[in-house]
Amino acid sequence: MMVVKDLSNALLTLKHVTKEFNDRIVLSDISLQIKRGDSIIIMGSNGSGKSTLLRLISGLIPVTAGERLIDSTGIVLGYAPDRMPKLKMTSTEYLTHMGRIAHIPKQQLQARIDELHSLFKLEQSTIKMTQFSKGMLQKVNIMQATLNRPDLVVLDEPFSGLDKPSAEHLVSSLQAIQAEGASIVAAVHDPLLASQLDSTIYFIQQGKLSEEPMTDAASFDQISFEIVCYVEEELQEQLASQFPEVVFQSSDENRIIITIQKKDYNDFMTELLKNGIELFSLQRKVG
Amino acid sequence: MLLISLLSYLHTCFIRSYRFGPPSFIFLAGIVFIYSVVPNPVMESYSFSVSFLFIISTMLSYAIIDNETMNQEAISIIHAGNIRTLYIAKLLYSWLFTVPFAIFALLYPALTYKFDRAPSITELLMSLLYHLSASWLAVAITCWFCTKFIRSRLTSFLLLTLVVVVAFSAQSINKLLPSAIQYVTILFPPVNAMMDVLYNYENHALGMKWMPIGVTLLYSFASSALFLIKLNRKKQDSPT
């Protein structure tokens, strides 16, 4: 992919970008301009192409058609993927490696690592990241993305797996990063957290990017239900074959988290209750 | 400076993954075992250790090149500035990791009197170049079997094994092929030529002794350069 320098005042511009994987169009005719200080939230259902769009913005994958233009003076970019791998090193060791690779001078780097640990309330210890909780890993993930004081921070599901206090703390940390002058582009699943970030919200649906909230008919497709219950393996297999779009995930204490789309809700619930399944929780989700 | 930072990071990750253990042990134990019977002819023995190092180097670089997860690799690319720099570091690190093995294969038999005579300095230097070229050739071939190009680890491992077998059987395959298509064997990795010259070292003129090193370095340079060009276009796009 050719990176073209942009002469407008935008940090990064996508012009009529299309992305295909094996002849399947994932993103179609996407145009987006990211200016200094912007905060942009990308919303959409699972598999809608949010992560692909973020990877395109970051330059990690090439565009199939269209152009990715960057500011003519060049930009510093930070990227936090949806999941941080558990590496066999401490957070300080990891950030030191990433900082050196990013050409940050030694003394400046140590000061920045200390500052980020204190901002994210993460202790600098000898504990390796293999023993970190999901929340701690997510903090390190965002710390590495903001290590080099980037002009643009791209975050893929930054609140994924965080409990409420951690998510709230992350919102305030992101606000602090934004106050330093960075632009933020983030894919966020939870509309409540998205609204707290005071951003321009875009929706991805069927590969198209739109600033308009989805129509009722479209949002109907985005409603899902999350059930936590205990289901015998045999019944689980039977339900999985009967409802192929329903997602089953193992949870703690042999519990199963089941995600159901709106269209399957009535039939699936009937089937569950018919089999005498007791629910631990039921949650309606939008987006 | 950037390359040194990347090499240091890749080294930390690889050493702590312990994935170097099995190939390293096989090589070191294999060399000690082979030289447990004495005396041995000098250059013929080095011919064997060159081919052994070639195989072990494919195993090591296969482990190094995909040691990072996809997400961590994305982070490394962003900090390094581009995917090409990261992969130059990965290829270089894979080769550097094999250098101590090359030196061990060279010095262990020479210093512990496992040969039927003392090797000359010229022979030692020439053999070192053969070992280092062979391991670089292995790295330059193995990079094509990373998950960027072949997603299934089983498929890539089997294909890489096939390429290694084909490389060693180049002369036999050449004899079996009809004369019209025998030229295709020049595309095979030139391991056979290296082994052949070392095995019959005394019978070759000086030019012929240097030729396999030149051909191997040229082949390796072309292979790794093509790989980096293709990777730079593809970036983190993966096959399905």
Image: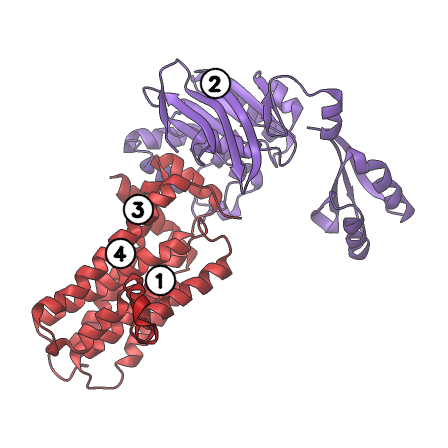
- Subunit that carries the residue with mark 4: B
Q: Are marks 2 and 1 on the same chain?
A: no
Frontmost of labels 4 and 1 is 4
Frontmost of labels 3 and 4 is 4
Question: Circle 3 — which element?
Answer: helix
**Which residue is the extreme one toward the top?**
A9
Where residue B229 sits, quadrant-wise, is top left
Please name the residue that numbered disc 4 is placed on: B220
Residue at point 51%, 21% (across, down)? A31
Residue B213 placed where, x, y %? 18, 63
Q: Viewer-proximal residue, A224 or A63?
A: A63
Residue type for callout 4: Ser
Q: Which mark is residue B88?
A: 3
Q: Are marks 3 and 1 on the same chain?
A: yes
Residue type for callout 2: Gln
- Counting residues from the N terminus, which is met first, the one under dot 3 or under dot 1? 1
- Subunit that carries the residue with mark 2: A
Question: Circle 4 — which element?
Answer: helix
Where residue B157 sits, quadrant-wise, is bottom left
- Colour of chain A as rendered: purple
How crowded pointer 2 is (Cα within 10 Å; few <14, some 14-19, many 20+) is rated as some
Residue at point 20%, 70% (across, down)? B106
Please name the residue that numbered disc 1 is placed on: B58
Query: How far apart, in angstroms, are the residues tagged by discs 4 and 2?
Result: 43 Å
The answer to whether the residues at label 4 and label 1 have Cβ atoms under 8 Å apart is: no
**Vertical relation: A205 (above or below) B102:** above
- Colour of chain B as rendered: red
The answer to whether the residues at label 4 and label 2 have Cβ atoms under 8 Å apart is: no
Please name the residue that numbered disc 2 is placed on: A33
